[in-house]
Image (cartoon, rainbow, N blue to C red):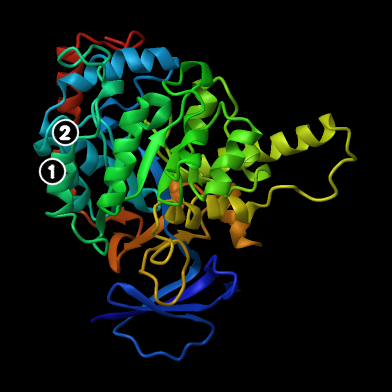
Amino acid sequence: MKSVLIKCGWLVTLDPRIGNFKGGELLFRGNTIEAVGRNLNAAADETVDATRMIVMPGLVNAHMHTWQTALRGIAAEWLSFDYFKNVHGNLATKYKPEDNYLGNLVGALAQIDGGVTTLVDWCHNITSLEMAERAVDGLVDSGIRAVFAHGTAKPLSQTEGIPFTQIPHPRDRVEALRKGRLSSDDGRVTLAMAILGPDWGAWDVTVHDIRMAREFGLVSSSHTRRREDCVVPDGYRRMAKEGLLGPDHNLVHGTSYDHADLKVVVDSGASLTSTALVELHHHIGDTIVAAYREAGGAPSLGIDVELYTSGQMFREMQAALLFARGKEIRNNVLRGNSHYKTMPVRSVEALEWATINGARAFMLDKKIGTLTPGKKADIVMLRADDVNMAPVWDPVYSIVEIAGAGNVDTVIVDGVTRKKDGRLTFPADVLRKRIGELTESGARIMREGGYKVATAPD
């Protein structure tokens, strides 16, 4: 297996046992990190000069509906009811398997371009095994590490007289994937279940789905909802009491949850993912990162949907951090406490939200999330001498507060270089063709759905 030695300008491992380095070296062989430190004196088949770069773990986007890539930006001025009416009630019903392939391929490549090495693809427009298979094909072909979270379509109209809230997760599709191409938990693309959960589905459906996920050894993930709209009031508390809520379940959003609700999540060992940019866009409750921290939780971050906002995880990380800081400082004053003497939410926490915490939420933390010997070689390099980056004094500050997708020079996923010298290694001619097909896909879907962006110029 090929060995690669990276000579770093700054090395941010996020492993507290190893620390960060000015300078430093990283050696990986095949798809596995072998050594990290100073002056490794290691022979290697290839040496990479990254002495003007920050070398860091790849970002983990822990929640994204990648199938919607062809609809980017159309919801910039929507509210939440517009989303359910226009997408799940209309446009999603026009999707074909090839639309899922194009959305996942181009969407995943954009994530790699922005420094993401692991994507949780929460694919909830699936109506057939073929649609699921083509969505997986897109992830595989992109080269990204992915968790394909198999979900189900959410039409507003009833299916054969039954509302989607009453329909259990389809065993046949999950079983076909789990016993077929996604049977291994060691592959670059693995399987999870994107279920309704008690906020969106009936109690018997929730029990069925959790038990099925556990039967197949899969992490399950569910969206939360405003309490007054929940199908099962206090459903997650009930799950916890009945042993159905644990480290193998991931909740998304939680913006209407109070401290007691969040303590249930924390005490059960379940995880919570915030999608701060989208939550700030239209959720009634606050993005939950600050409150979840106060409850003892360690949030992860995701993009959610590019219909509303940018798919760049650097922006997501910055937004979540700034909201959490502002919330903590305001809460402290409102409680009558003296002013903080130091910043209550540190920059490194936000970087952990966007890396190791996302890995942990989907039980990948022993494989990825930090630059630790024995873990997979999922590595990102940022140009520290770019005009918007230099000078670098603390590399963590520069990553979290300053950097953007445009500073990503190199992305390595599972030991394979997927971006180099600022350009994706995916064949450029094929990418141009796929982007054209994606554009045609989005146009057809909106045409068939009778939808037009009202503000778009003719």
In depth, the one of 49 and 113 nearer the eye is: 113
Percent coordinates x, y for residue 237 in the rendering: 52, 35
Which residue: 22% across, 13% down?
Answer: 158
Q: Amino acid at mark 1?
A: Glu
Looking at the image, residue 82 sits to the left or right of residue 151; the answer is right
Looking at the image, residue 100 sits to the left or right of residue 298; the answer is left
Residue 257 is drawn in which quadrant?
A: top right
Which residue: 47% across, 30% down?
Answer: 235
Residue 209 is drawn in which quadrant?
A: top left
Residue 359 is drawn in which quadrant?
A: bottom left
Q: Amino acid at mark 2?
A: Gly
Percent coordinates x, y for residue 46 in the rendering: 31, 80
Which badge, 2 or 1, comes first in the chain's sequence? 1
Percent coordinates x, y for residue 121 in the rendering: 30, 42
Residue 9 visible in the snapshot: yes
Q: Which residue is mark 2?
A: 436
Q: Residues within 10 Å of mark 2 (few under 14, many from 20)?
A: few
Number of marks in picture:
2
In depth, the one of 314 and 393 nearer the eye is: 314
Percent coordinates x, y for residue 107 in the rendering: 28, 40
C-alpha span from label 2 to label 1? 22 Å
In depth, the one of 394 and 116 nearer the eye is: 116
Relative to residue 403, is residue 58 depicted above or below?
below
Q: Which mark is residue 133?
A: 1
Looking at the image, residue 174 sits to the left or right of residue 390; the answer is left
Q: Quadrant of the C terminus?
A: top left
